[in-house]
Image (tube, helix red, strand yellow):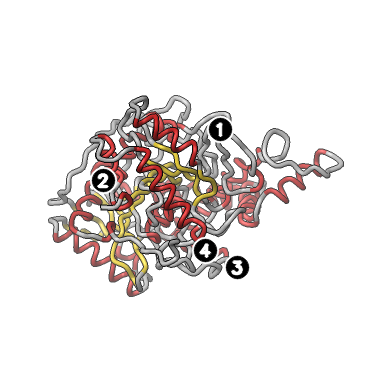
Amino acid sequence: MRIEDLSASELVDSIAARQVSALEVTDHFLGRIEALDKELGAFLSVFPDFAREQARRVDAGQVTGRLAGLPVAIKDNMCTVGQKTTCGSRILENFVPPYEATAVARLRAQGAVLLGKTNLDEFAMGSSTENSAYQVTRNPWDPSRVPGGSSGGSAAAVAARMAPLALGSDTGGSIRQPAALCGVTGLKPTYGRVSRYGLVAFASSLDQIGPLARSAQDCALALDVLAGLDPRDTTSSDAPYVSGLQADVRGLKLGVPRSFLSDLAPDMARVFEEACQVLVGLGATLVDVQLPNLSGALAAYYIVAPAEASSNLARYDGTRYGFRAADAPDVLTMFKRTRARGFGAEVKRRIMIGTYVLSAGYYDAYYLKAQKVRTVLSRDFAAAFEQCDLILMPTTPSTAFKIGEKSSDPLEMYLSDIYTVALNLAGLPGLVVPSAPVGGLPTGLQIIGRAFDEPRLLSCGHAFQTATDFHQRHPEPSYQS
C-alpha cells in the first residue's frame, strides 16, 4: 500500500513499529506537495528542511510521543515560532511570531512533524478560500471549484493526500464546510475544549481550533492531544475528556430538524436522507426535533462576528508589527493608508459592518438583539437535546461551487454558512463526515452534540464510517506531474 493511502492512525502505528521511517513518510508527503500544490495552492509556505530534521529526530529516538513522525499541516492563522504567520493577509506578510499556539505546541510535543502552513481566507473571513491575499486554493476533486473556507487550504491538503492531518479553525463553519466540500472529516470541538492561545483572533467568542483528517478515528487521535485546559487561555475548559471510540449507535436517538431543511435542493436532500438511514440501519432511531429560531442564526452571526472582528483587528495599525505604509506624512494618515493597503475587501467589509453595529444608536438595534438571538438558540438546542442524543443536519446547501461564482455577491456567499453558524453561536461541537457524492462532488453529513460530548459525536461518525467508504475515496488528480 502506498504511504498516502495510510490513515494518520495507521501511519503512527507503522512508524512506531519501524515498518517505515518518519523521514521516509515526511519525504513522501513533501514530494506530493511539490507535485500537486502548484495547481491546488493549498500551502502558503512549506518547510522541507525543518520537517526532515524533525523526522530525523523521531527516527533517532530523540523525540517520542503519540504522534511521533506524523506529518501535519497548520492553518496559517496559528502562530508558529520561527515561521511566518500571515493569516492570508498583506498586513502580516512578514510577521514571525515570538511564541507558538498551544495547539501547535501540543502536536509538536507529541512528535508531530510540521510540513507547512496552509492557505485561508484573509483572517479566516470567507467561505471559499478565494479571499486570501496570496492565492486562490482549488478543490482537488475539480480545480475549477472552491475547496470551501476559510480552512480551505487544510481541507484541500488532506483531500489531495498532501498531509494526513491538518489543523483548521472554525468561527462559523470554517472547518466543517471545507471538510464537506473536499470529502474529508472535520471536527469543530466545543468552545473551550481546545486552547485558542496563539490563534490569531477573528471573533473571540466563536473561534475554535480543530482537526481535519481522513476519518473520525484520525480526528479523535488529534483531539486526544489537543484537548485540555490551558492557563494561557481563560476561555479554555477543564471539562473532563475521555478518549476512545465505539462503532456502536444502537439505541441512540438522532434528532433531525426537518422544518429547517425544507428548502434543501433535491439531490442534497436525498444524500442527507440516505446518510440518516445508514445510521438507522446500524440501530439508531430518528426523532423529529424543533429548532424554531434556527433561521435567525445566520443574521445573528453576521452581526456578532463582524462586531468582534472590528474590535480584534483594530490592533493592526502599523505601529507595532506587520505592514506599515511608509509614505505617510503623519500618524493618522499612516493608520489610514496602512489599513487601506493591508486589508482586503472582505476584511474591510466586515470591519465596517462590525463598527456600524457597535456604534452609538445602533448597538441595541443590532448587536444587543443578535446576542439575545444567540441566547435563544442555545435554549433551542438544549430543548432539542432533551429529546435526542445527537442532531443530524446537512453541512452545506450545495456541493462546491465554481471559483468566482459568488465573489461578486457577498450575501450569496454568506448563505453558504446557513447550516453551520448556529453551532458557533451556541458553542456546541460538530463533526462532518463525508457522505454520498452529488454530481461526482463530495457532500458531508453534520453531526451535532451536546457541549463537551465529543466522544459520543466521534463514535457516531466512526460508526457511520465503518458502514460506508465515502471517507476512503479521494481524487486521482490528472494534473499530477
The residue nearer to you, when weighing 205 against 95, is 95
Image side of residue 209 versus residue 64, left or right:
right
Residue 414 picture location, percent across and down: 51, 61
Quarter-of-image position of residue 115: top left
Q: Which mark is residue 413?
A: 4
Classify mark 3: helix, strand or loop: loop
Q: Is residue 79 above or below residue 338?
A: above
Classify mark 4: helix, strand or loop: helix
Image side of residue 160 versus residue 290, left or right:
right
User: From mark 1 to mark 2, how far is it between C-alphas?
Assistant: 31 Å
The residue under the point 77% across, 44% down is: 325
The residue under the point 31% across, 59% down is: 434
User: From mark 3 to mark 1, how far is it between C-alphas?
Assistant: 37 Å
Query: Can you tell which of label 1 and label 4 is closer to the viewer?
Result: 1
Q: Residues within 10 Å of mark 2 (few under 14, many from 20)?
A: many
Comes first in the chain, label 3 or label 4: 3
The residue under the point 52% across, 51% down is: 120
Query: Can you tell which of label 1 and label 2 is closer to the viewer?
Result: 1
User: From mark 1 to mark 4, how far is it between C-alphas?
Assistant: 35 Å
Comes first in the chain, label 1 or label 2: 1
Comes first in the chain, label 4 or label 2: 2
User: From mark 4 to mark 2, how far is it between C-alphas?
Assistant: 31 Å
The residue nearer to you, when weighing 273 against 244, is 244
Q: Residues within 10 Å of mark 3 (few under 14, many from 20)?
A: few
Q: Amino acid at mark 3?
A: Ser
Q: Amino acid at mark 4?
A: Met
* Residue assigned mark 3: 408
Q: Which mark is residue 82?
A: 1
The residue nearer to you, when weighing 326 against 16, is 16
Residue 91 picture location, percent across and down: 66, 45
* Residue assigned mark 2: 217
Q: Residues within 10 Å of mark 4 (few under 14, many from 20)?
A: some
